[in-house]
Amino acid sequence: MQTSPSPAENAPTAEPGRWRKLAVDGLWKQNPGLVQLLGLCPVLAVSSTAVNGMALGLATTLVTALSGAAVAAVRHYIPNEIRNPVFILIIAALVTCVDLTMNAYLHALYGVLGIFIPLITTNCIVLARAEAFASKNPAREAAFDGLTMGLGLTLVLAALGALRELFGRGTLFSGAELLFGEPGRALTLHLVPAEANYQFLLALLPPGAFIGLACLIAAKNALDARTKRRAAARPTQAEPDAAPATEGAR
């Protein structure tokens, strides 16, 4: 059964400002980890180190971008009644490809991430973007939306992992060789000497994940509030300059 595209879907590709809006929404304004609060299970469970968070975030980004493009490409041919099962089937096929590839070429990292790679299939972010955006927009925009949403999640995972690793172990980019190979060992930074055997368990355990995510959300909200205050103050500063011009016109 083929569904007929709506007039909006027949419209030409969006203007450049549309691409910028998609990027800003995915990376900041509608960030899935800080604003939409989707996919919290992997965000909180895998973010014990920056490398683990970055690796899972990049895998999710690949699936989100490819599934968005795939769903958008076949959206006219999917009956509305079965669209969700078809979307999940597409996502599951892509996740299987990523899962097998990581198992073959990044086996040590695959062992660390474990079940969270297959669980990308049920990640709310992937299915939400397929349903809310990819099913209504062209393939290029859907792929870009999935890419920016995935990168936004990756930034949150990497930042939260770095925060927990820094306070919990006194290191940064520990285990980088799992993602980048043997040269990645040079990226590991020991901010606390290794012989000190430093550990702060609160940061490494699940409560530390909740606390760290709350700090990141609070920091984003503070930056947004500061930006709004500055934007609101600009017209007020321009008013005194306008007054003499009005008087001169009289």
Image: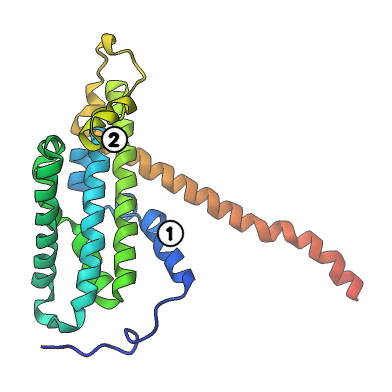
Query: Residue drawn at (19%, 29%), measured in percent from left and top?
Result: 205
Q: Which residue is mark 1?
A: 24
Relative image position of residue 107 (x, y in whole percent): 11, 38
Q: Give amino acid for label 1.
A: Val
Q: Quadrant of residue 250?
A: bottom right
Nearer to the camera, 170 or 29: 170
For this rendering, which residue is in front, 15 or 185? 185
In the picture of the structure, the residue carrying the numbered disc 2 is: 50
Q: Hey, what amino acid is under mark 2?
A: Ala
Measure the C-alpha gap from mark 1 to mark 2: 23 Å
Image height of 72 relative to 212, above or below: below
- The percent position of residue 4, horizontal first and vertical second, equals 22, 90
Q: Earlier in the sequence, mark 1 or mark 2?
A: 1
| Badge 1 density bin: few <14, some 14–19, many ≥20, Cα 10 Å | some
Q: Residue furthest top?
A: 195
Residue at (32% x, 33% y) in the render: 162
Say left or right for 66 vs 249: left
